Image (cartoon, rainbow, N blue to C red):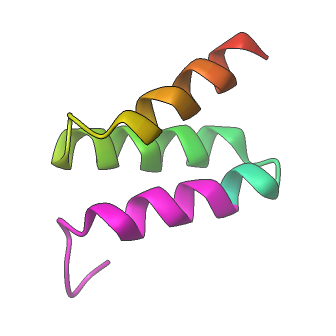
Amino acid sequence: MKLKPDDFSAYKLRGEAYYFLQNYQEAIHDWNRALNINPNDTKIHKIGVCVISK
C-alpha cells in the first residue's frame, strides 16, 4: 500500500481479509478507501449492503 496508495484492488482484498478475520471496522475502512478510489465498483457496493444488513 505504501508503494501504490491508490491501488483499488489492494484495499478491496485487504478489506475482505479483515472481514473474514472478523475485524469489521478495519474492513469497512479499507472498503471505504477502495470506494474513494473507484466509486463505480458494484462489488464493493454489494459488500457494503451485506455488511450493513448484518
Question: x, y (%) of residue 24?
Answer: 69, 40
Magenta stretch, residue numbers: 1-17
User: Residue 53's quadrant in the figure?
Assistant: top right
Going 21% across and 35% down the picture, which residue do you hit? 40
Q: Residue furthest front?
A: 42
**Front-most of residues 44 and 18:** 44
In the rendered image, the vertical position of residue 17 relative to residue 52, given as above or below: below
Q: Quadrant of the C terminus?
A: top right
In the rendered image, the vertical position of residue 30 relative to residue 47, given as above or below: below
Going 37% across and 34% down the picture, which residue do you hit? 42
Residue 39 in magenta stretch: no
Going 44% across and 50% down the picture, which residue do you hit? 30
Question: Would residue 53 be found to the left or right of residue 26 on screen?
Answer: right
Question: Would residue 25 be found to the left or right of residue 36 on screen?
Answer: right
Question: x, y (%) of residue 28?
Answer: 53, 38
Question: x, y (%) of residue 32?
Answer: 37, 38
Question: x, y (%) of residue 35?
Answer: 29, 39
In the rendered image, the vertical position of residue 21 relative to residue 3, given as above or below: above
Going 57% across and 19% down the picture, which residue do you hit? 49
**Front-most of residues 44 and 27:** 44
